[in-house]
């Protein structure tokens, strides 16, 4: 005798709400973030946000799928409209899914159209990258090599000017290993299922110009980022993220230093925490 068993499932989506603020002394930015994330499917996310700064209101919408057709490949599409610019992005990658992931690679394509009184230009950039992951116990090391090909076309003022910006970049990310946290902590329970930067992350980036492709600039970037989880009224919040970046341009003999602040609040309900402890799919 045989028995036919039919199993059906229904995707459930959850509403994500957050806030972001940052900017510089002259241009403060704040905004709201909304999203719908699939809980029992494979994690597809639809997001939309609003930003307000000194230039006006900006809007963005995006879609991401971290497991295309159940695979280990991910994709995302984004569109952003600001008072002076329209940005589009397309990403296809095999990212770091956990601490044990040994390599990651992918490609992205971005376009930007900028128009205001007396100035108009458009840019295109293609990125192809490959990274390795090494678990060294206390920290996880992730060196990456990226080929960055960019073009900028200035249409106003006339005549039209086209500039190439092509680089080969080498970066190194150092992440705290969350398995060093106590077993009953939020970090230990959730870090194995999603590649979220917890603790301290260092990013060092160096770019070498490619004169054969028309570029003439060399730059370095230093980044420092800290995130922290805390519990408040039986819920868990990612309440702080700090990013410092310094850029030095040698090709044009100009030094640029910038300070950015980004704070994101993320809430997880008790049911989702219990579901994670039982081994059910996350987020």
Image (cartoon, rainbow, N blue to C red):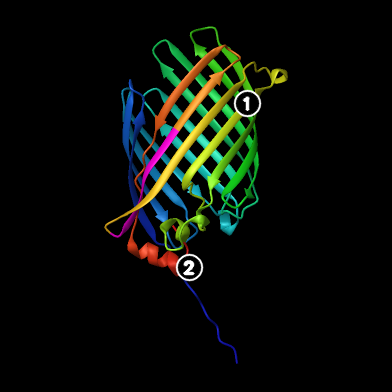
- In the rendering, at what x and y percent does residue 153 appear? 55, 17
The residue furthest right is 212
Give, as a single range, the part of the protein colored magenta: 234-243
Q: Nearer the viewer, residue 128 or 275?
A: 275
Q: Is residue 258 above or below residue 102?
A: above
> Is residue 270 visible in this depiction of the protein?
yes
Instruction: Tell me the tag on residue 207.
Output: 1
Report which residue position mark 2 lands on. 279
**Direction from residue 197 to residue 205 in the image, left or right:** right
Give the side of residue 150 with respect to residue 88, left or right. Answer: right
Residue 268 is inside the magenta segment: no
Q: CA distance from mark 2 to mark 1?
A: 42 Å
From the top left corner, tell me how far across and down residue 203 is, in percent.
55, 36
Q: Is residue 94 visible?
A: no
Q: Quadrant of residue 80?
A: top left
Q: Nearer the viewer, residue 36 or 100?
A: 100
Q: Is residue 233 above or below residue 274?
A: above
Q: Camera-side residue: 135 or 11?
A: 135
Image quadrant containing the N terminus: bottom right
């Amino acid at each position: 005798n045989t028995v036919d068993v039919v199993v059906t499932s229904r995707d459930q989506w959850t509403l994500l709400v957050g806030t972001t603020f940052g900017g510089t002394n002259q241009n403060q930015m704040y905004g709201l973030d909304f999203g719908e994330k699939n809980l029992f499917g494979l994690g597809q996310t639809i997001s939309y946000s609003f930003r307000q700064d000194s230039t006006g209101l900006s809007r963005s919408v995006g879609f991401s799928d971290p497991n295309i057709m159940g695979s280990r490949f991910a994709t995302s599409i984004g569109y952003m409209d600001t008072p002076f610019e329209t940005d589009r992005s397309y990403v296809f990658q095999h990212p770091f899914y956990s601490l044990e992931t040994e390599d990651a690679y992918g490609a992205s394509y971005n376009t930007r159209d900028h128009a205001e009184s007396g100035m108009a230009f458009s840019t295109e950039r293609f990125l192809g990258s490959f990274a390795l992951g090494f678990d060294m116990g206390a920290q996880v090391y992730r060196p990456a090599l990226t080929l960055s090909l960019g073009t900028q076309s200035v249409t106003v003022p006339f005549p039209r000017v086209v500039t190439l910006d092509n680089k080969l970049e080498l970066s190194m990310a150092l992440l705290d290993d969350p398995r060093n946290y106590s077993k009953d902590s939020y970090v230990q329970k959730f870090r194995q299922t999603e590649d979220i930067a917890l603790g301290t992350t260092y990013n060092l980036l160096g770019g070498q110009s490619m004169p054969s492709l028309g570029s003439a600039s060399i730059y370095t970037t230093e980044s420092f980022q800290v995130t922290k989880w805390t519990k408040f009224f039986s819920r868990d919040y990612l309440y702080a993220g700090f990013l410092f970046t310094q850029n030095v341009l040698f090709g044009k003999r100009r030094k640029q230093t910038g300070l950015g602040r980004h704070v994101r609040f993320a809430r997880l309900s008790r049911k989702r925490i219990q579901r994670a402890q039982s081994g059910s799919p996350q987020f």
